[in-house]
């Protein structure tokens, strides 16, 4: 999944299955927090945590696996 595809997924109400959880606590800039809040307002069916999870998943999916070149 590409990050650019996420708005279509959110508009369609598609959710990834939750295969288990591992909690992280992260600090974000005020600008990033405001952008996340704006996304949550655009897609009210999703919590900020769900949006952040989707964004993180898409970003990690786009990276090469550790030890491999893309």
Image (tube, rainbow, N blue to C red):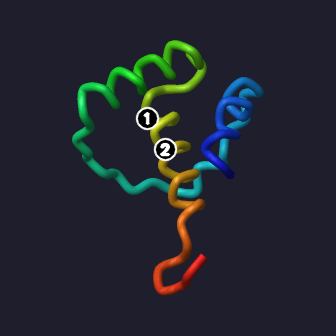
Q: Residue at x 65, y 37 (%)?
A: 6
Q: From the image, tell me which residue sits under label 2.
A: 53
**Circle 2 sits in a helix, a strand or a loop, which is it?**
helix
C-alpha span from label 2 to label 1? 6 Å
Horizontally, residue 4 falls left or right of residue 34, namely right
Q: Residue at x 52, y 43 (%)?
A: 55
* In the rendered image, the vertical position of residue 37 relative to residue 29, given as above or below: above
Where does residue 30 sit, x and y in percent of width and height?
24, 26
Horizontally, residue 24 falls left or right of residue 1, namely left
Where does residue 59 sit, x and y in percent of width and height?
52, 53
* In the rendered image, the vertical position of residue 46 relative to residue 6, given as above or below: above
Q: Residue at x 58, y 49 (%)?
A: 18
* In the rendered image, the vertical position of residue 44 relative to residue 55, given as above or below: above
Q: Residue at x 44, y 28 (%)?
A: 48
Outermost residue on the front side: it is 70
Where does residue 27 sit, x and y in percent of width and height?
22, 41
**Mark 2, residues whose alpha carbon is within 10 Å: few (<14), some, or many (≥20)?**
few
């Amino acid at each position: 999944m590409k990050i650019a595809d996420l708005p279509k997924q959110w508009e369609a109400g598609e959710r990834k299955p939750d295969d288990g959880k591992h909690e992280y606590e992260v600090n974000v800039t005020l600008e990033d927090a405001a952008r996340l809040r704006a996304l949550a307002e655009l897609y009210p069916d999703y919590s900020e945590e769900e949006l952040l999870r989707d964004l993180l998943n898409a970003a990690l999916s786009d990276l090469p696996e550790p030890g491999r070149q893309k």
